[in-house]
Amino acid sequence: MHFAFDDDQLAFRDAVRDLLAKECPPEVVRAAWPEGPDEHGARKGDGARADPPRIERVWVALAEMGVLGMAVPQAHGGLGLTEVDWVLLAEETGFAALPHPFVETVCVAGPLLAAAGDPDGLVPGIVAGTATVGVVPLDDLVAWGDRVDRVVLLDQRTSGRHWQARRVEGGLTRGPKPGTPRRIEAALDGARAPLVLQQWKEVGRCGTPDDAALAFDRGALGTAAQLVGLGRRMLDLTVGYVSERRQFGVPVGSQQAVKHHLADAALQLTFAAPAVYRAAWSLATGAPEAARDASMAKAMASDAARLVGRKALQCHGAIGYTVEYDLHLYLKRAEALARAWGSAGWHRNRVATALGI
Amino acid sequence: MHFAFDDDQLAFRDAVRDLLAKECPPEVVRAAWPEGPDEHGARKGDGARADPPRIERVWVALAEMGVLGMAVPQAHGGLGLTEVDWVLLAEETGFAALPHPFVETVCVAGPLLAAAGDPDGLVPGIVAGTATVGVVPLDDLVAWGDRVDRVVLLDQRTSGRHWQARRVEGGLTRGPKPGTPRRIEAALDGARAPLVLQQWKEVGRCGTPDDAALAFDRGALGTAAQLVGLGRRMLDLTVGYVSERRQFGVPVGSQQAVKHHLADAALQLTFAAPAVYRAAWSLATGAPEAARDASMAKAMASDAARLVGRKALQCHGAIGYTVEYDLHLYLKRAEALARAWGSAGWHRNRVATALGI
Amino acid sequence: MDLTWSADEEAFRAEAAAWLEANLRAWRERHGGRILSGDTAEGFAQHLEWERTLFDAGWAVVSWPEAYGGRAASLWQWLAFEEEYHRLGGPPRVTQNGIFLLAPSIFEFGTPEQQDHVLPRMASGDDRWCQGWSEPNAGSDLASITSKATRIDGGWILDGQKTWTTRGAFCTHLFGLFRSDPESQRHHGLTYLLVPLDLDGITVRGFGRLDGDEGFAEVFFDGAFLPDDALPGGVVLGGEQQGWAVAMATTSSERGLTLRSPGRFCATADRLVGLYRERLAADPEAVDPTLRDRVAQRWMEAEAYRLQTLQTVTRTVAGQPAGAETSLVKIWWSELDIALHETALDLLGPEAELEGAWSKGWQFALSGPIYAGTNEIQRNIAAERVLGLPRK
Amino acid sequence: MDLTWSADEEAFRAEAAAWLEANLRAWRERHGGRILSGDTAEGFAQHLEWERTLFDAGWAVVSWPEAYGGRAASLWQWLAFEEEYHRLGGPPRVTQNGIFLLAPSIFEFGTPEQQDHVLPRMASGDDRWCQGWSEPNAGSDLASITSKATRIDGGWILDGQKTWTTRGAFCTHLFGLFRSDPESQRHHGLTYLLVPLDLDGITVRGFGRLDGDEGFAEVFFDGAFLPDDALPGGVVLGGEQQGWAVAMATTSSERGLTLRSPGRFCATADRLVGLYRERLAADPEAVDPTLRDRVAQRWMEAEAYRLQTLQTVTRTVAGQPAGAETSLVKIWWSELDIALHETALDLLGPEAELEGAWSKGWQFALSGPIYAGTNEIQRNIAAERVLGLPRK
């Protein structure tokens, strides 16, 4: 029994953390938001006013470090890392609110396509950072709709209880003709640029039902890890702010109400994180409870991140409620991810079923 | 539109409050608990060590004031008050944790039996305080099993969706033979002395299904009012304690965490109470939403009283966790009443149905 | 106790409903159904047009005297009007900081001349008022205001900065507190001033709220000269150095009855019940079985707010003042608003991520526990003034 | 990372399980299945007999050296033992304040002579230790202790009062803090003393907890003479006037690993899952549809506690000390314990009112957020020492 990461895993985590701190600061996240007013007349993003090439540069840098091929077997040009090896990297991409389909392309599609023998020849591109594959779990929303080249559907819809991964053509453009512009929906988190799946054609399955099930659990795990990272980011930001900000002649953070809000936030993260790391281990070792453990991780991380977001906003007060301050970038991402890849309630239902109730 | 009680109603409330303050202090509630160790070896009550005749004296005093016949029509010797007139009196019996079947006998059985033409000739005794009738709503527990002479069952069990009030013989003794000793169960609130309904025989219905439905709603309303009273008692006790108790050189109640706990308690009571008073009005006027309103009252009062109890205990600290201090008398009563006459969840379900969902 | 509406109140309600239904439809149609947020430049103009329509028909400020553009409605009629307004989907009032926050102070502290000038122009939307309370270092701790008003011959020189000024970028006037006694500390030596924003030396910069609307502004005062006669009746409300007392009366209104009518939350709760029904009809399997209970709970919480308000109005009509329990009211509606919207988002599931009325409403609701005095401050107030707990 | 148990650990677990199963059954049978609460006079004797059985077979203090009655088990083995103990329904340990609170301090601060005398007699139950921290005016504010220890020739004179002394009425010895420097303030000038309760001038009065058990005691010291040689090795632990530092080490254990093994909460969670299954089988209509979600949530929270403990033990085994996050751990298990029992009571419905294991457990759980440092104090500590927020 040994529940800790090894030095290699921590060193890789630190390297990715450093890279993202340099290449993916808040202004890069902001740049991924669309410019101009939304349908309510609101302006939230900097879009082209910022420095869009920097968005791509993060992805390239991650590719150069090997991160984009982390979950792809070495035979396909990747690093062949297990979930235990990469879960902390996913957490860091959450901490940075990386505006790319990291979970979908890197944690899910890469290893899934490789396991299926790379039917479309996309895996080398994924590893190199030149191909991005969207994954649509459970519903009809394609996250990162402005960035993905292809889509894999992951669900149990037409197949009873078995998971299936369907490779599709189309789905990303509005009409039946290729080249029709994509319609990115206005969304809570502008950087995620979701689109509603359009007309598509199944061109084949991707691996076995077990491969598909594992792919879904990897998506839930990767998202859970990102939520823990987002929670940590919001807590860090808030601790820093309330330690400096003074009202009534004392730092806001010396008030007991603020302390207790943030202790509650830390509490939830402290107990959600081990659930995420354990799920990584269960997936990596093919444990019989792997699906249950992935669901527990996603449920706890979703609830924890939402609670941290609420506490963070409240402890900031008005400054946190502005578009100019960074908190909202993380808060909205967390709120979106909390429901992506199955909400907390959806996953608790799966845990309950696994418990035989 | 006028949402307030009139001077007569408030004056009657004050008179009952004064009477209960004098005749039903905590030591009287304590005296109603059984003496001696329970099945775990724990001693909670004073029983015969206290002054048992005082328990009966409260009931007699209430009878003398007319309170026990408050809901019985004047034609049957009562005061013929409406729910709006008596809801505050019920609240006061909660505040005092009156150890008698007030809701069952006074709020429910009295008017129900009178409406049914007093088939067993019990109503004059109820008004005079010489007869007590237990009411068993929904389940098999007879509260105040050591005090009631007869039992009325109130449920929808054998009759589809209609409520029915069944007059029964027996049910209070352990065996089929009258006179076999009653078996009072060890219970959270020793004063309530519940017994599990034993063998009984239906001797007739009591009024129409509408009478039975109204009787149930009156029970829910009376219990909700008692819960509000209990909440106020616990809050009062706690405010008094934390204002005196000093730690770290300041009153405990000057700590922000304690303030916020008790503000939350006050918050819930402030918004539960109007729901209870409105339900009284809906029942008194036969409003079409009366059942929904009674359920809303019971659901909100149950949740409010439980929350107040938790906050009260926490703000007291260790002293509140002793049998010698009075808080537990109110806290346990509240916990028991929160589930009696339908739990919060049971009543929310009824509200949801009334909302058409 | 009588929880029925009188025939007179019902008639008032019916008249309001009929007028609102027709005119809301007409307003929306005039804009091709494309109504923007009132907290954006273009949307503000749309909403101002709507408020002008309200004013012209006498529905802008129903409880005010007719002389100022109201119809002298009773509090009960006002409540009924608000219920209809929200039931029929009337938009948030972009003039609310004037009509709900400043106006009560003008009624209480203003001279007749001030009242005659300010109130009708506020009701009509000719003058749009924003509030100037907060400063970068005076948020929850309002008494640490440093913006200065220096008395000179014929007026005041204003210096300093206000911030979190809601819709400041679209307003014409500001009301707020300025330190007029340079030697004073905390809540002493403050004056409540009425300030046209077009004075030289005043700069207004709008900035975005969390939901992207430019709902906030910073207002900079750089030696701006505010003449005593900038407004008929003068620019001081309630006497020099008396600003704190006047402002406290206003913040009490802000938390109290007028800003957040229960009609708004009951209407939202009814829409939530409707949403549940729709989702269940569309796909019963997809609806989390815990949500029915949560929807019922939310509906009850909104209804409880309505009932508590009926109690308060009954007391107000009887001449009893609202007490510190307005702090509890503010906690209740602000937390209810978030809970209503979170329940809706959970019903929507993954779709919640897409912008829509519920998502927009949720983002707006998140500000509730922060503005108008944080809920932490309100809990302190409730504990000390309602329960009587000792101050620190 | 390796989340499997080694063959050695599994063997240890199997041995423990087999022994526990047989001996728990035998113990219950010896008492005709009528096991009382260990916090009542009669029940304490029953439980002491059980603990003696544990001791005789070497299972009383598995992680202690064999010389003191343990079997030098690793922390992993200890965790596995606790899991089996709770899974099989082993009763709460009535000697726990000695073996989990005092013993760590004896190991850390005791002289060899003290260790040799105190530890084996504690493990066997020959000496039963209660703690003497709290006083009527020193609860959360422990540093305001006023009980005095006056140095005289050959020993100490003790005066004052301790209270909330768990199971004090059934114990033979008390460990606690006394003010030994009469001029001292707060946490200075305190000495940690080991006190036999049968000294002249010491009176112990048991009183009832909320659940009726006589689990508390007041201990009065009226000029009691505590000879230096009342215990071999002396009655002072860790040096005169050093009491605060010694006590803080103990309270840290109290909150930390040893008092509340996750096995207890995981076993309760498993029983909750079983209860849900039973109730559903008995009458599906009667089960509130929100409860399945809540049961799953509770199970996850217990499991998360287990996982967090595995992380902590991994760090401890690697020689890293437990930090301030033990405060978060105390909040977690104490709130989890209440939530587990409340969910069960809601499943039981009206029957919850009747006494039973869940009702009893719920009443006991209510004390969790109060004892061992209130959760308010823990949240302060977590905020200041884990997050680094400024002190007041």
Image (tube, coloured by chain):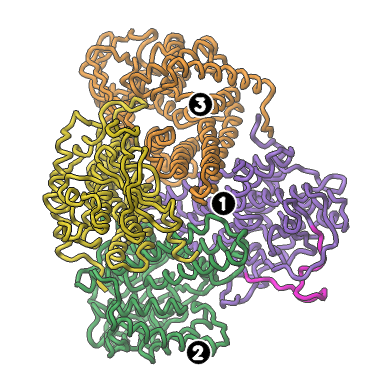
Chain colours: A purple, B yellow, C green, D orange
Q: Amino acid at mark 2?
A: Ala
Q: Residue furthest left?
A: B64
Q: Which residue is mark 3?
A: D89
Query: Comparing marks 1 and 3, which lies closer to the viewer?
Result: 3
* Residue B62 in picture, x, y percent from top left: 15, 49
Q: Name which quarter of the figure residue A326 lies in.
A: bottom right
Q: Chain of mark 2?
A: C
Q: Residues within 10 Å of mark 3 (few under 14, many from 20)?
A: some
Q: Chain of mark 3?
A: D
Range of magenta residues: A166-186
Separation of residues labelled 2 and 3 (CA atoms)? 71 Å
Q: Residues within 10 Å of mark 1 (few under 14, many from 20)?
A: many
Separation of residues labelled 1 and 3 (CA atoms)? 38 Å
> A204 or D156, which lies in front?
A204
Q: Which residue is mark 2?
A: C26
Q: Which residue is mark 1?
A: A231
Q: Secondary structure at mark 1?
A: helix
